[in-house]
Image: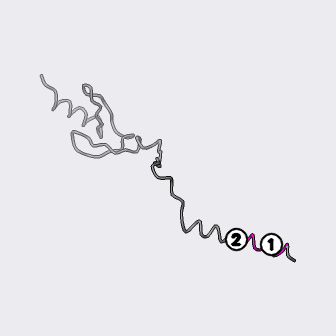
């Protein structure tokens, strides 16, 4: 009978421990940083078309290099208009 009481006490202690632990989540040690890495962050980033000002997802944008800068456009048509308006002759 004592062994049964001991097992029951251990089970109750375990459940009490889990309840208290869930109420007080652990914190990282001070001075450490938590970095959440998302490999798709660059793909899901929104960029603004410099010609028409529309925001488009980077993965869906028409990307092209103009000079040394990379620009993202909503369409090839906006890219062509941008080149026509910003080309110095």
* Secondary structure mostly seen in the magenta stretch: helix
- Which picture quadrant has residue 8? bottom right
| Residue 24: mark in rendering | none
Q: Position of residue 28 (x, y in %)?
A: 51, 54
Q: What is the crowding at mark 2: few (fewer than 14 residues within 10 Å), some, or many (at least 20)?
A: few
Asked whether disc 2 touches disc 1, contact meaning CB atoms under 8 Å apart, the reply is: no
- Which picture quadrant has residue 6? bottom right
State the residue in front, 67 or 51. Answer: 67
Q: Position of residue 12 (x, y in %)?
A: 71, 73
In the displayed structure, 25 sits above or below 33; it is: below
In the picture, the quarter occupied by the N terminus is: bottom right
Q: Residue furthest right?
A: 1
**Residue at horizontal 31%, vertical 43%?**
47
In the displayed structure, 82 sits above or below 7; it is: above
**Residue at horizontal 85%, vertical 72%?**
3
Which contiguous range is marked in magenta?
Answer: 3-12
Determine whether the residue tagged by mark 1 lies in a helix, strand or loop.
Answer: helix
Determine whether the residue tagged by mark 2 lies in a helix, strand or loop.
Answer: helix
Label 1 belongs to which residue?
Answer: 6
Label 2 belongs to which residue?
Answer: 13
Q: Position of residue 81 (x, y in %)?
A: 20, 34
Q: What is the crowding at mark 1: few (fewer than 14 residues within 10 Å), some, or many (at least 20)?
A: few
Residue 5 highlighted magenta (yes or no): yes
- Which picture quadrant has residue 57? top left
Q: Position of residue 88 (x, y in %)?
A: 13, 25
């Amino acid at each position: 009978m004592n062994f049964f009481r001991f097992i029951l006490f251990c089970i109750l202690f375990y459940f009490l421990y889990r309840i208290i632990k869930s109420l007080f989540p652990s914190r990282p040690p001070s001075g450490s940083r938590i970095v959440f890495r998302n490999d798709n962050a660059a793909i899901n980033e929104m960029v603004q078309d410099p010609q028409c000002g529309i925001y488009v997802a980077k993965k869906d944008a028409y990307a092209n290099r103009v000079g040394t800068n990379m620009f993202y456009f909503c369409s090839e048509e906006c890219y062509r208009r941008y080149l026509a308006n910003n080309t110095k002759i």
